[in-house]
Image (cartoon, helix red, strand yellow):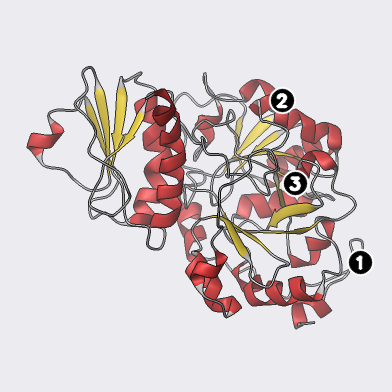
């Protein structure tokens, strides 16, 4: 067992983390925006993150209530992961199918035992050793669960999804709690994920179910975490995210393609969130534009009515005039900027009640894999209408 495993002590004992919590580069960005990002119509339930409001949020969670939680990926709808009744409130608030499991968030490596079987099996231990330095960060692992995790969290599975978020506010709240936090994205099921606090409100929000929202500013990545299943000879990629499966495969010493799932997904027995064919969908039909990236798409057929456009880089003026509104996500086509702004732009266009939204596509390299995964699932509803 490596040093991080040897330093583990059970909850209630004094322990010192062996994983430095030095601020990662993305948290520098968050620090500049955390207390300045305020929507002019922000509801009274949104609170700046202070020692007082974090303790208040922890108290609400301990009392079985739900809280809006910022992370570096998207905003989460948080509940005490050991409290089955509180977890059921998440499913009611989101109208979430009970077969769609949740991700459990813990404060540190020393708290992994709050969620997963401890000690882990030899193969899980070895695989954790290969990736442990990626935490805190946008990576979720699926492995055997602790007996304290209720069936509601895992959709009845003996496996649980767990991660350590790379966001100061989320870590502070987790530190203030004596329990892990279950937190899916804080939106109605199958709708666009929230990447800023005001997204939890309005017609598509879940504000009537929450006690408060901690304001952590706009989310750094804007897409959900990478999810991998551990325990087999080759870990399996269940959902792409900011950490690519190629990077992970290099750490495991395996071929990247060996991590990819073969065959379709059985939506009756989901191993992790984000695996449903239809997900992240705006109300307006979403049409993906072939950008010669071998995405298997075609140019959208001419449509009448008010059409919006999500452009990954500036488009020509003669192309822009055919759209009612154009959202340009990056001046250079930078994938991190596109990922960071994608869901917010999609929500703004959806609020305009357009007849359709046309969206650019990108290659599947690096972060493009996660972006295209979200867009394909978001466009699936439109495909079902054809």
* Distance Cα–Cα, label 3 vs label 2: 17 Å
Please tell me the numbered disc located at residue 181.
3
How packed mark 2 is, by other alpha carbons closer than 10 Å (few <14, some 14-19, many 20 or more), is: some
Q: Locate the C terminus and report the quarter of the image it occupies.
A: top left
* Distance Cα–Cα, label 1 vs label 2: 36 Å
**x, y (%) of residue 56?**
75, 38
Q: Locate the N terminus and report the quarter of the image it occupies.
A: bottom right
Residue most extreme to the front: 263
Q: Which label sits in the foreground, 3 or 2?
A: 2
Q: Nearer the viewer, residue 57 or 161?
A: 161
Q: Which residue does the numbered mark 2 point to in the structure image?
A: 92
SS for callout 1: loop
In the image, taking residue 293 as reference, residue 3 lies left or right, namely: right
- At x 62%, y 27%, the residue is 45
How packed mark 3 is, by other alpha carbons closer than 10 Å (few <14, some 14-19, many 20 or more), is: many
Q: Nearer the viewer, residue 254 or 62?
A: 254
SS for callout 2: helix
Are the residues tagged 3 and 2 within 8 Å (C-beta)? no
Q: Is residue 192 above or below residue 303?
A: below
- At x 86%, y 69%, the residue is 119
Are the residues tagged 1 and 2 within 8 Å (C-beta)? no
The reply to whether residue 252 is visible in this rendering is: yes
Q: Which residue does the numbered mark 1 point to in the structure image?
A: 13
Q: Nearer the viewer, residue 266 or 179?
A: 266
């Amino acid at each position: 067992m490596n040093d991080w495993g040897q330093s583990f002590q059970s909850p209630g004992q004094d322990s010192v983390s062996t994983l430095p919590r030095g601020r990662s580069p993305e948290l520098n960005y968050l620090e500049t925006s955390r207390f300045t990002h305020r929507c002019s119509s922000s509801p009274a339930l949104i609170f700046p993150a202070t020692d007082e409001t974090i303790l208040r949020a922890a108290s609400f969670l301990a009392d079985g209530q739900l809280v809006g939680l910022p992370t570096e990926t998207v905003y989460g709808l948080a509940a005490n992961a050991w409290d089955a009744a509180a977890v059921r409130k998440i499913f009611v608030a989101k109208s979430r199918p009970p077969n769609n499991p949740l991700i459990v968030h813990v404060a540190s490596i020393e708290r992994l035992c709050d969620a997963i079987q401890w000690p882990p099996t030899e193969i899980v231990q070895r695989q954790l050793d290969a990736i442990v330095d990626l935490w805190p960060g946008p990576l979720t692992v699926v492995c055997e669960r602790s007996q304290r995790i209720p069936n509601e969290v895992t959709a009845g599975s003996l496996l649980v999804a767990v991660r350590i978020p790379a966001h100061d506010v989320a870590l502070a709240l987790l530190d203030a709690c004596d329990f892990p936090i279950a937190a899916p994205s804080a939106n109605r099921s199958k709708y666009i994920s929230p990447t800023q606090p005001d997204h939890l409100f309005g017609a598509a929000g879940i504000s009537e179910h929450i006690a408060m929202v901690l304001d952590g500013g706009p989310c750094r990545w804007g897409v959900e975490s990478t999810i991998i299943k551990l325990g087999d000879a080759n870990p399996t990629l269940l959902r792409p995210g900011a950490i690519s499966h190629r990077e992970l495969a290099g750490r495991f010493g395996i071929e990247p393609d060996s991590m990819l799932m073969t065959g379709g997904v059985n939506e009756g027995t989901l191993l992790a969130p984000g695996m449903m064919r239809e997900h992240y969908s705006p109300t307006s039909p979403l049409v993906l534009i072939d950008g010669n990236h071998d995405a298997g798409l075609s140019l959208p057929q001419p449509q009448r009515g008010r059409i919006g456009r999500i452009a990954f880089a500036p488009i020509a003026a003669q192309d822009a005039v055919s759209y009612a509104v154009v959202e340009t996500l990056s001046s250079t086509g930078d994938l991190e900027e596109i990922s960071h702004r994608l869901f917010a732009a999609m929500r703004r266009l959806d609020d305009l009640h357009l007849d359709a939204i046309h969206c650019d596509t990108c290659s599947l390299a690096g972060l493009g894999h996660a972006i295209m995964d979200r867009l394909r699932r978001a466009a699936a509803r439109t495909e079902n209408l054809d």
